[in-house]
Amino acid sequence: MSARDHKVVSLSDEERIALEAICRRRKVDALVWKRARAFLLLDAGEDAGTVCRILDIGPTVLTEWRFAFGGAGLSFFGLKDYSQRQGHLSVAQEQALKAHFTECLAQNVDQVRAFVLSEHNLTYSRSGAAKLMARLGFEYKKPKLLPAQANEAQQAAFIAQYEALISGLAADEMIVFSDAVHPEYQSRPAHGWFPKGQKTALKATSGRKRLNIQGALDLETFQFTFVEGEKINAQTTQRMLEKLERTNPTMTAIHVFVDNARYHHAKALQPWLESQERRVKLHFLPAYAPHLNPIERLWGVMHAWVTHNRHYPTFDQFTEAIFNFFRKTLPQKWQEFRDTVTDNFRVVSLEKYKIV
């Protein structure tokens, strides 16, 4: 920018990057910060009077700054040849990098650093690469796991069916959601708040033992009915349904929502389901729609409560902890889980997400 253009401020891309970097610094001289901020505001279209009010400076001061910047360029801010410093991409290079990683997922900052080094022969630190990606509009996060073959129409139809059932439910009828869970006897490290600077570790367990639990959850009372077996099949399903009927003798109808696992459709189960005295009525969830089964979220609560960052020296102790959660913790503290384990259903559409 030349001195004769002091009435109009139009920064180059490199100048804008340099001044934005100054304003982002945690430690910067207050006067230098004000100068950089003033020119960024002018470049953004603010008039001189507005800039003076925002920064609490006089118009004469701003005029002097504009003349000085017109003659000295970035050295007016104590920067020398900023645009050519090693480790900084040009605007065009940054946009090319943004386009590349929009199409090709960067798993970590090391991949970003490697790309910049190979394409532009510039070296970034790990923290520098992270800041670069954040500035370009990226954030480090885990993608949401969604069913690959979810059918939106079937989900909507199910939600409508469920809401109709709820609205017409008699006082002597109940609804439960059923599923199976298989807690493995393995230590599960998870995020937590640990003392800063202290190395943390979780003792590992060995072996492939696991529990096989089939349960049913009433969202109104959080009554949880379950059975355990060597494996989950038509026989354990019938045992669990029989237990539901025994523990709810006053209910004339017990509506049980289940997924499409083969044992729910097993021929061995049909004679029992079709008998005249049967009060259990099965309702099937849409295929590939686990988000429509609230008990899935109960399994997550169970793991957070019992298995995350916990080590059990023996499988028996692990088993006891799991059963204690269902038999004691859940009945006593179910209100703490109510906001997590809900029937606040929605249709999942892959079109709303960027698929990796």
Image (cartoon, grey):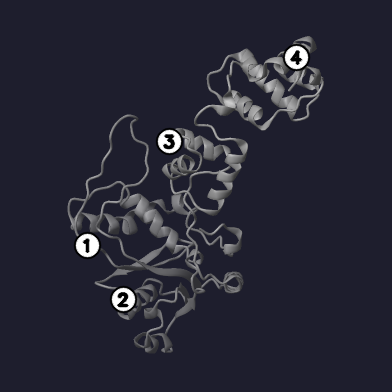
State the residue in front, 337 or 197: 197
Query: As displayed, is residue 238 above or below residue 184?
Result: below
Question: Spatial distance from mark 3 to mark 1, Cα to Cα?
Answer: 38 Å
Question: Spatial distance from mark 4 to mark 2, Cα to Cα?
Answer: 84 Å
Q: Which residue is mark 2?
A: 236
Q: Which residue is mark 3?
A: 126
Q: How many marks?
A: 4
Q: From the viewer's perspective, is 102 left or right of 249?
A: right
Is tag 4's residue or tag 3's residue first in the polypeptide sequence?
Answer: 4
Is tag 4's residue or tag 2's residue first in the polypeptide sequence?
Answer: 4
Q: Quadrant of residue 226?
A: bottom left
Whether residue 222 is visible here, answered yes or no, is no
Residue 197 place in picture, x, y as percent: 32, 29
Report helix, strand or loop for mark 2: helix
Tell me the quarter of the image containing the N terminus.
Answer: top right
Q: Which residue is mark 4?
A: 67
Question: Spatial distance from mark 4 to mark 3, Cα to Cα?
Answer: 39 Å
Report helix, strand or loop for mark 3: helix
**Disc 4 vs disc 1: Cβ atoms closer than 8 Å?**
no
Q: Which residue is mark 1?
A: 208
- Residue kind at label 4, given as amino acid type: Phe
Question: Spatial distance from mark 1 to mark 2, Cα to Cα?
Answer: 21 Å
**Disc 4 vs disc 2: Cβ atoms closer than 8 Å?**
no
**Disc 3 vs disc 1: Cβ atoms closer than 8 Å?**
no
Q: Quadrant of residue 22?
A: top right
Q: Closer to us: mark 1 or mark 2?
A: 1
